[in-house]
């Protein structure tokens, strides 16, 4: 295990920390080095003559020491007398990018105004995933903060920020980060990020950070200069070397990532994390690193409520089981099953990794009742079984979406899903997403029908371009529709500046696409204000197939069969006449009849106008529509 840091006023065991107005303590794990020197540029210019300060070796490969250095001081670590220095693995800022020097930062100058903020539980929330660089024209935290009041007004309660640890170049998705403690310099200063979160909290919004704890990016990754054992050959990762959480010298590596999580929670007041691709976080230790991270993060939050979400392709529900039953203590799981069914229902295409889905009514009913569709059955795409049981998990534990950064970009043209289906079917699917018992998530611009695409874009060095292009092409070629030479040749260039800028949102589309914006606004209001939809009650819903493309979800009030019951009738196909209707879920409460509470057919949303779904005992299910019914006195 890593050694304890020396007795000094440090908050974290690694990195550069101010201990006085112009004094800084440095500490780094570098077991490959016999000698380690800090090269300091107190004037903030990397071209000036540096001042050298030798750190003291500690047991277990650590080096530390304190010297004169104030905020803004640039520095590098020189190993074993080398004149070429490297960035600090725990750098708090890389103002000149991944290859430049690290910078001493004062984390205590920002004046927080969120003392009363206690965080949010996952239950009852609506998540909004966004990418800082494309969310606004400026692509900064300061510009993004200006849009927070409108998100709050719409009904968003949690914003999920794509990764911001320093990554190569000036634009990218962030999943190839290499300086995980350093907020991306292109988005603004660390205090700009703090101001964004402080503003969000003042509006009642939680902010969670997407973190990548499964690999480091290939460019600007200098960790091997310090230690070989950041990585292990005992496990294999699809995106680079697997991180060492359970092999020789794994203690300092575990400390690095646990500290990183605590740092984001304590120094930036983040409200939790979305953990990227947790299936690639390998750990056979008695306590999995993810459980250790969630525990340490909660301790750092000092009583604030935190939200932890996992992306997990194998659908391992242990992630959200409680610690005491051997789980990792998270709150929610991204539900790809729901997305894949929705995409097939909207487009009719079940190729590539959608091959195991039909987009049928039963799939949506099962997703609403049980979360994951695959909980141990055979899965054609993997040629093996997939998933683990989700029984006993609350509905909010499953995060449902019909768009996210991956699923929009994993197409030949990066177009939004609404352009691949009919407007009416899109409205119906949106209603299902936003009224279902799960936790719904929107991707930036989805709420107003953004016309901007979302491509994969990157700014890594030329030597990596060919490999990245090849990998993207091979991934998309798993879809027969995208495999032709013509389609492959037309793919957007990930490294072209235009590819990045085309992804930026145009907020004037809130007015241009007012019907879609009104649809999302009204559905989120209904979800929030109707106590039956808001309840997300375990076991509080059932469903039935009504036709080849239609189904009903019945949400029960606290007393089933009361005026609090709600029907959500969804039809992704043609007009359906349902007579007779031998389905008990369609029966109204005693001495009541169903009346329309809301419908996607309203002209304000672009629909043709509402019709009575049940009349004189006959059911008429409108084509490509969703309708919410409530009980009312007969003839009332």
Image (tube, grey):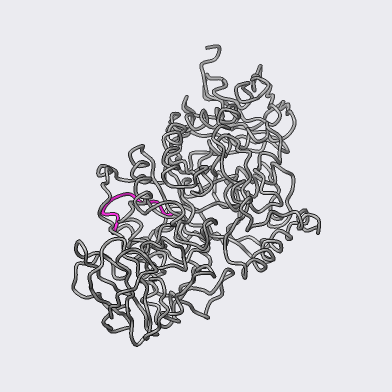
Residues 282 and 583: in front is 282
| Left or right of 309 on screen, residue 301 | left
On whether residue 163 falls in the magenta region, the answer is no
Q: In which quarter of the image is residue 260?
A: bottom left
| Left or right of 293 on screen, residue 333 | right
Look at the picture and state if 140 lies above or below 389.
Answer: above
Residues 565 and 406: in front is 406
Point out the residue furthest to the front here: 48
Residue at point 71% right, 61% down? Answer: 473
Look at the picture and state if 448 lies above or below 353.
Answer: above
Look at the picture and state if 477 lies above or below 546.
Answer: below
Residue 39 image point, x, y percent: 34, 75
Considering the image in quadrants, where does the N terminus appear? bottom left
Point out the residue furthest to the bottom here: 34
Residue at point 28% right, 58% down? Answer: 106
Residue 489 image point, x, y percent: 77, 57
Residue 578 image point, x, y percent: 71, 27
Residues 301 and 133: in front is 133
> Which region shows up in magenta?
300-308
Residue 420 image point, x, y percent: 71, 41
């Amino acid at each position: 295990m890593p050694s304890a840091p020396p007795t000094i006023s440090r908050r974290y065991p690694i990195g550069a920390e101010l201990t006085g107005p112009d004094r800084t303590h440095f500490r780094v794990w570098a077991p490959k080095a016999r000698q380690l020197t800090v090269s300091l540029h107190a004037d903030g210019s990397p071209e000036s003559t540096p001042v050298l300060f030798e750190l003291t070796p500690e047991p277990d490969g650590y080096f530390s020491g304190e010297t004169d250095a104030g905020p803004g001081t640039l520095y590098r670590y020189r190993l074993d007398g080398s004149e070429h220095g490297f960035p600090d693995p725990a750098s708090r800022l890389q103002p000149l990018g991944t290859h430049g020097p690290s910078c001493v930062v004062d984390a205590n100058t920002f004046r927080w105004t969120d003392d009363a903020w206690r965080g949010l539980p996952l239950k009852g929330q609506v998540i909004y995933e966004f990418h800082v660089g494309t969310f606004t024209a400026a692509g900064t935290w300061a510009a993004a903060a200006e849009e927070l009041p409108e998100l709050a007004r719409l009904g968003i309660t949690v914003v999920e920020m794509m990764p911001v640890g320093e990554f190569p170049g000036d634009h990218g998705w962030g999943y190839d980060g290499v300086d995980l403690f350093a907020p991306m310099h292109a988005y603004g200063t660390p205090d700009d990020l703090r101001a964004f979160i402080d503003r969000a909290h003042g509006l009642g919004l939680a902010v969670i950070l997407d973190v990548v704890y499964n690999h480091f990016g290939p460019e600007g990754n200098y960790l091997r200069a310090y230690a070989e054992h950041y990585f292990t050959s005992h496990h294999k990762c699809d995106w680079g070397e697997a991180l060492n959480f359970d092999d020789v010298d794994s203690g300092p590596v575990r400390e690095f990532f646990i500290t990183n999580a605590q740092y984001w929670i304590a120094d930036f007041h983040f409200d939790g994390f979305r953990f990227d691709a947790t299936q690639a976080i390998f750990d056979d230790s008695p306590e999995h690193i993810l459980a250790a991270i969630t525990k340490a993060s909660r301790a750092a939050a000092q009583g604030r409520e935190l939200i932890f979400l996992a992306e997990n392709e194998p659908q391992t529900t242990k992630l959200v089981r409680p610690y005491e039953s051997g789980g990792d203590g998270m709150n929610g799981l991204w539900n790809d099953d729901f997305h894949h069914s929705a995409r097939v229902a909207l487009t009719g295409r079940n190729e590539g990794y959608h091959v195991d889905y039909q987009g049928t009514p039963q799939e949506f009913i099962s997703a609403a009742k049980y979360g994951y569709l695959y909980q141990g059955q055979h899965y054609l795409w993997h040629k093996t079984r997939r998933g683990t049981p989700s029984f006993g998990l609350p509905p909010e534990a499953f995060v449902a979406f019909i768009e996210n950064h991956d699923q929009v970009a994993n197409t030949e043209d990066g177009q939004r899903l609404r352009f691949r289906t009919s407007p009416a079917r899109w409205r119906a699917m949106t209603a299902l997403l936003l009224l279902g018992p799960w936790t719904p998530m929107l991707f930036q611009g989805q709420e107003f029908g953004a016309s901007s695409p979302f491509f994969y874009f990157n700014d890594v060095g030329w030597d990596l371009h060919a490999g990245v292009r090849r990998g993207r092409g091979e991934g998309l070629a798993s879809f027969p529709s995208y495999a032709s030479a013509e389609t492959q040749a037309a793919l957007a260039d990930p490294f072209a500046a235009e590819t990045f800028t085309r992804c930026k949102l145009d907020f004037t589309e809130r007015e241009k696409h007012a019907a879609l914006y009104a649809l999302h606004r009204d559905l989120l209001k209904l979800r929030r204000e109707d106590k039956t939809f808001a309840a997300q009650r375990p076991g509080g819903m059932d469903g039935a197939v009504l036709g080849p493309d239609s189904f009903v979800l019945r949400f029960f009030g606290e007393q089933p069969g009361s005026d609090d019951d709600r029907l959500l009738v969804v039809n992704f196909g043609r007009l359906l006449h349902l007579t007779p209707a031998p389905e008990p879920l369609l029966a109204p409460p005693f001495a009541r009849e169903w009346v329309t509470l809301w419908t996607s057919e309203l002209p304000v949303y672009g629909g043709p106008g509402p019709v009575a779904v049940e009349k004189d005992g006959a059911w008429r299910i409108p084509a490509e529509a969703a309708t919410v019914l409530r009980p009312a006195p007969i003839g009332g």
